[in-house]
Image (tube, grey):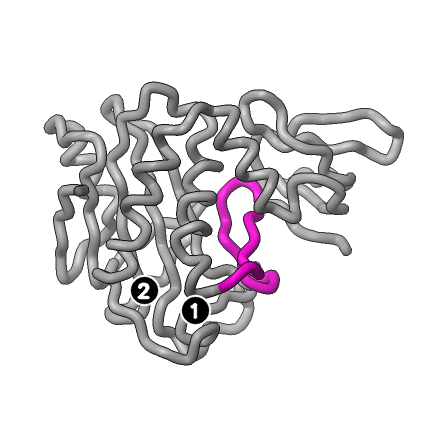
Amino acid sequence: MSLVHWHDSLPSTMSEAARLASLGAPHGSVVAARQQTAGMGRHGRQWLSPPGHGLYCTFILRPAQPLGLTLGLGVAVREALAPHAGAELDLRWPNDVLWRERKLCGILARMEHGALLAGIGINLNQTEFPAGLRTPAVSLRQIRNQTFRAEDVLDLIAPSVEEVSALPLGEQLRLFVRFSSYAVGRRVRIENEGTALVGVTDGLDEAGFLMIRKEDGSREAVYAGSVRPLD
């Protein structure tokens, strides 16, 4: 059972998890908050974290092999939420969980103090979202027409994160490809720091980086960037 540090409000669960990791917090510890005032998304973007609307948490993981675990975390969340959101859940490289092309969960992972800090934000009870989001969003409430408690959803995903993080890298990557419509045969545009790459996804390399087959037939590995569908 994970050791969970619950807070009514924090600037960021990621920052608090980093502090605990520096003090030697054990593998599987979780920092969770009912509200974040400075939630962090990928590429320095803000993650909106109003009270009562989502699960905001960061896992402190100390796996034997952290390589590729970012993809494994998406698999873990998808598996845990599938009974509530169904088979339409999708994984977009590297770690967004989507429902009908709308973002249900975002994951931000980084190494600090010898631990992999896995920030997970899940939309639970929103009935509407701000206009102009880069990816349209959705909540579990919109999918199931019922409200969800953050504590209950954390209880669902914690065992799944523990299980997937213990799998060999190859198995994590296999599961990601199985559950992701973006992994193979999807025409996409990759945007990264002002550059763009267009091509068709062609699986993952041995480290979990996305392979793109370009129009000239050559293949290129994508190490970072935002993936947007073109079909």
Q: Quadrant of residue 191?
A: top right
Q: Are marks 2 and 1 in contact (CB under 8 Å)?
A: yes
50 left or right of 209?
A: left
| Residue denoted by label 1 | 139
**Residue 193 appears in the rendering:** no
Q: Residue at x 29, y 44 (%)?
A: 159
**In the image, 134: left or right of 181?**
left
Q: Is residue 13 above or below residue 48?
A: above
Where is mark 2, residue-wise?
54
Q: Position of residue 10 (x, y in %)?
A: 18, 55
| Residue farthest along the right direction in this orientation | 216
Along the viewing direction, whichever of 71 and 12 lies nearer the viewer:
71
Dot 1, how many residues are within 10 Å of its Cα: few (below 14), some (14-19), or many (20+)?
many
Work out whether residue 185 can be spotted. yes
The residue positioned 25% from the left and 71% from the top of the image is 52
Asked whether 91 falls inside the magenta stretch, the response is: yes
Q: Nearer the viewer, residue 197 or 75?
A: 75
Query: Residue 125: within the magenta?
Result: no
Residue 67: image location, x then y, percent: 44, 24
Q: Residue furthest front?
A: 83
Identified at 36% across, 54% down, the residue is 121
Locate the C terminus by quadrant.
Answer: bottom right
Q: Residues within 10 Å of mark 2 (few under 14, many from 20)?
A: many
Type of amino acid under label 1: Ser
Q: Secondary structure at mark 2?
A: strand
The magenta stretch is 86-101
Q: Quadrant of the N terminus?
A: top left
